[in-house]
Image: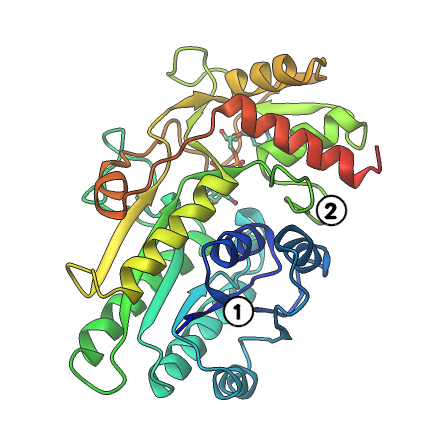
């Protein structure tokens, strides 16, 4: 029997790439999204890449208990991957209530409906932001979580705790929930088909969309936030992970849950490459691999940025049998191909 995976926020950047990988791995997927931060491009891309015209898309606002309940009643869901959330750090500082309301209530509704409908497997998309400014790099899953520096980061920590508590409370009951928390580092790039990728609304907050939009001429100049950090070239260090590699980690995690292979009822994995890359190195790679010059300048540090964080992905490598494979160059070539596709070039 084919298993069915519900992907909440499945039309977005990460959700669309995960949907493709799940379908290609033989799962049935239900894509659900309220389209508040994307359009149907992601879903249409998933259909094109997989050559399928029968993937259910259900417009669902997970903040609505009724809509969430209706979705779980309409489909027999074996596992849910929860992406549906707001994700802009700065906006979350300006509009905390909106962030807490949206990110917490949608997850609570998903957990309640999953438990009530006998869907025992919940995978939550968390973030390396939970580690804050780490005392030691690379970070392992045992590294301490630090107080969140934004309401966005706080919602990630709170949802991690909510899932942990729910797993504990439902153990051995009919509505038992098992959980996996995947802590993503910096997902970048696009599908090699250039049919899906990141579609930021307005001015991008994240580095790579800002780079590609500057290269295509939509933005005048990239500001590199800070070149006086205590790092080799003075710019921040991050663990940039290819979006397709990241998506594949979800397939491994879902298989682990559905095949009953979990060692503990709630597991945590870092999803990163283990490779620190500076902002300047990333910009240089982008220029080199795509044979162009990028207009950039150094600007003051951005509030809330940490100096350096990258993953120790050993646990995911060993336990999930997953490893990031793509080079930064390959990923930046894919990001550029996607930007050109958007511009119709
Ligand atoms: C941020 C969030 C993280 C979230 C991720 C994906 C925090 C502290 N960070 O990560 O939780 O999961 O986005 O949405 O909560 N940069 C520039 N110029 C730009 C944009 C960025 O120099 O125009 C630099 C930043 O200073 C940083 C690096 O590029 O050093 C990466 O920034 P970004 O892509 O925004 O990701 P993070 O801040 O690492």
Q: Quadrant of the C terminus?
A: top right
Q: Secondary structure at mark 2?
A: loop
The residue to which callout 1 is attached is 102
Residue at point 61% right, 37% down? 192
Residue at point 27% right, 84% down? 175
Left or right: where does residue 12 sit relative to residue 323?
Answer: right
How packed mark 1 is, by other alpha carbons closer than 10 Å (few <14, some 14-19, many 20 or more), is: some
In the rendering, at what x and y percent does residue 100 appear? 47, 66
Q: Is residue 8 above or below residue 109?
A: above
Sequence-first tag of 1 and 2: 1
> Contact (CB < 8 A) between labels 1 and 2?
no
Mark number for residue 202? 2
Q: Secondary structure at mark 1?
A: helix
Q: Quadrant of the N terminus?
A: bottom left
Q: Is residue 120 above or below residue 148?
A: below
On the image, which quarter does residue 15 sit in? bottom right
């Amino acid at each position: 029997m084919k298993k069915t995976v519900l992907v909440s926020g499945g039309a977005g950047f990460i959700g669309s790439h995960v949907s493709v990988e799940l379908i290609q791995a033989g799962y049935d997927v239900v894509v659900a999204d309220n389209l508040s931060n994307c359009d149907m491009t992601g879903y249409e891309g998933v259909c094109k890449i997989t050559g399928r015209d029968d993937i259910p898309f259900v417009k669902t606002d997970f903040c609505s208990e009724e809509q969430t309940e209706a979705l779980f009643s309409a489909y027999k869901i074996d596992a849910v991957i929860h992406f549906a959330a707001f994700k802009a750090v700065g906006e979350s500082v300006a509009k905390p209530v909106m962030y807490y309301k949206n990110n917490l209530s949608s997850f609570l509704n998903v957990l309640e409906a999953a438990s009530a409908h006998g869907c025992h497997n919940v995978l939550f998309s968390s973030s390396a932001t939970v580690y804050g400014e780490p005392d030691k790099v690379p970070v392992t899953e045992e590294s301490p979580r630090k107080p969140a520096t934004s309401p966005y980061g706080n919602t990630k920590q709170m949802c991690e705790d909510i899932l942990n508590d729910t797993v504990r409370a439902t153990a051995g009951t009919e509505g038992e929930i098992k959980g996996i928390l995947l802590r993503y580092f910096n997902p970048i790039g696009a599908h090699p088909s250039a049919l899906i990728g990141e579609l930021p609304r307005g001015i991008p907050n994240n580095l790579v969309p800002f780079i590609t939009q500057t290269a295509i001429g939509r933005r005048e100049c990239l500001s590199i936030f800070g070149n006086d950090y205590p790092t080799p070239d003075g710019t921040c260090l991050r663990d940039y992970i290819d979006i397709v590699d990241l998506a594949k980690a979800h397939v491994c995690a879902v298989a682990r849950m559905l095949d009953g292979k979990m060692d503990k009822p709630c597991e945590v994995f870092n999803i990163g490459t283990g490779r620190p890359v500076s902002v300047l190195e990333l910009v240089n790679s982008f220029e080199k691999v795509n044979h162009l010059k990028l207009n950039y300048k150094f600007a003051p540090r951005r509030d809330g940025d940490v100096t350096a964080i990258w993953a120790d992905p050993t646990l995911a490598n060993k336990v999930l049998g997953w490893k990031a494979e793509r080079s930064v160059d390959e990923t930046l070539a894919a990001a550029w191909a996607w930007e050109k596709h958007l511009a119709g070039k």
